[in-house]
Image (cartoon, rainbow, N blue to C red):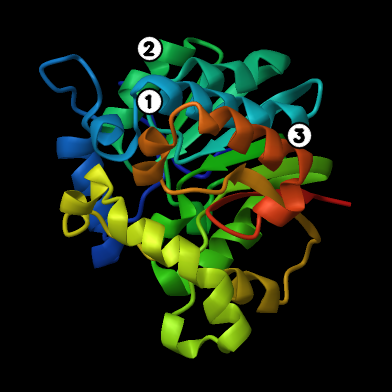
């Protein structure tokens, strides 16, 4: 039986949040309760409208990227932990828990969890909680996913979030974390680094993401790959490619997204060095 350090409310949510949140966390919670997980006139979540390219080739490419996670999850188990689950609105997301008896959805947002319950159903466990202080005992979940989440955690607490996800895994458990690598400042690179970074720098200047207008509304801080590699982690991680390009670039690639997906699948560690990595953690 899963032990949760919190209070079960009449609406079925476990309340495990402290009375006061750091300003950055309060901002993220407020954004998703009041804006991100509301639907627009087309019935689409505002978060998806802002941050996900749903057009043609880009939409199909991103659906295939979301499906990549499945290859690294166990074939079965009792509990799948979904850290900052959101409403579990994409079908590829819902497929992750088909092999497990229960999906434990942890999120700061009540709005997200109420919609997650509609999408996941009675096999779900719904927890208002903080990834940096997961209200679960050590070694209790078979697997975990965290998708586009940890770069919204305060920058000085992101390492703690990685360690918390590792802590709650059972021995032999697997976690798949989709992160984003911040590009090092161009001026800080050596000549070789500048030459390698220049094409991506030009592309980013020419392709402005629709999410840019929301930057002031939602806390965000991505670390560099060098930051991750410098940490003294209690685990070994396999860093693979989830997607090596920014969302704003995808639509302009058109049919070339098929080639990009093939290259990322063929050389996952190489392409995992930029863009959105899939960090796979296995607990010994």
Q: Is residue 116 left or right of residue 73?
A: left
Give the distance between the C-alpha atoms of the residues marked 3 and 1, in whole angstroms. Answer: 22 Å
Mark sitting earlier along the chain (3/2): 3
Q: Please tell me which residue lies in front, 2 or 259.
A: 259
Residue 194 % position (x, y) = 52, 80
Residue 105 % position (x, y) = 49, 31
Mark 3 falls on what kind of element?
A: helix
Q: Please tell me which residue lies in front, 1 or 132.
A: 132
Q: Quadrant of residue 160?
A: bottom right
- Residue at the image position 33 percent from the left and 23 percent from the top: 55
Give the distance between the C-alpha atoms of the residues marked 3 and 2, in whole angstroms. Answer: 26 Å
Mark sitting earlier along the chain (3/1): 3
Image quadrant occupied by the N terminus: top right
Crowding at dot 3, Cα within 10 Å, few <14 / some 14-19 / many 20+, comes out as: some
Q: Nearer the viewer, mark 3 or mark 2?
A: 3
Q: Is residue 13 left or right of residue 26?
A: right
Residue 174 % position (x, y) = 76, 41
Mark 2 falls on what kind of element?
A: helix
Q: Please tell me which residue lies in front, 46 or 25.
A: 46
Marks 2 and 1 in Cβ contact (< 8 Å): yes
Residue position marked by numbered label 1 in the rendering: 87
Residue position marked by numbered label 2 in the rendering: 118
Answer yes or no: is residue 206 visible.
yes
Q: Please tell me which residue lies in front, 184 or 176.
A: 184
Answer yes or no: is residue 138 visible.
no
């Amino acid at each position: 039986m899963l032990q949760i350090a919190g209070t079960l409310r009449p609406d079925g949510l476990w309340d495990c949040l402290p009375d006061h949140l750091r300003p950055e966390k309060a901002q993220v919670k407020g954004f998703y309760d009041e804006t991100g997980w509301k639907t627009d006139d087309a019935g689409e979540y505002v978060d998806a409208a802002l941050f996900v390219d749903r057009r043609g080739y880009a939409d199909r490419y991103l659906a295939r990227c979301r499906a990549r996670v499945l290859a690294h999850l166990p074939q079965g188990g009792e509990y799948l932990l979904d850290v900052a689950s959101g409403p579990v609105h994409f079908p590829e997301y819902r497929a992750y828990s088909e092999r497990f008896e229960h999906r434990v959805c942890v999120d700061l947002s009540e709005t997200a969890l109420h919609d997650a319950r509609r999408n996941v159903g009675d096999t779900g466990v719904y927890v208002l909680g903080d990834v940096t202080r997961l209200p679960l005992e050590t070694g209790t979940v078979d697997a975990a996913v965290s998708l586009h989440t940890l770069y919204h955690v305060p920058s000085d607490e992101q390492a703690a979030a990685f360690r918390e996800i590792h802590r709650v895994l059972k021995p032999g458990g697997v976690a798949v974390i989709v992160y984003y690598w911040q590009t090092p400042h161009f001026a800080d690179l050596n000549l070789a680094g500048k030459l390698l970074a220049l094409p991506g720098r030009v592309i980013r200047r020419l392709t402005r993401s629709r999410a840019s207008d929301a930057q002031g509304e939602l806390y965000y801080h991505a670390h560099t790959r060098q930051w991750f590699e410098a940490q003294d982690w209690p685990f070994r991680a396999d860093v693979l490619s989830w997607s090596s390009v920014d969302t704003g670039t995808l639509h302009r690639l058109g049919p070339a997204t098929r080639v990009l997906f093939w290259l990322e699948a063929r050389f996952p560690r190489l392409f995992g060095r930029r863009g959105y990595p899939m960090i796979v953690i296995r607990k010994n």
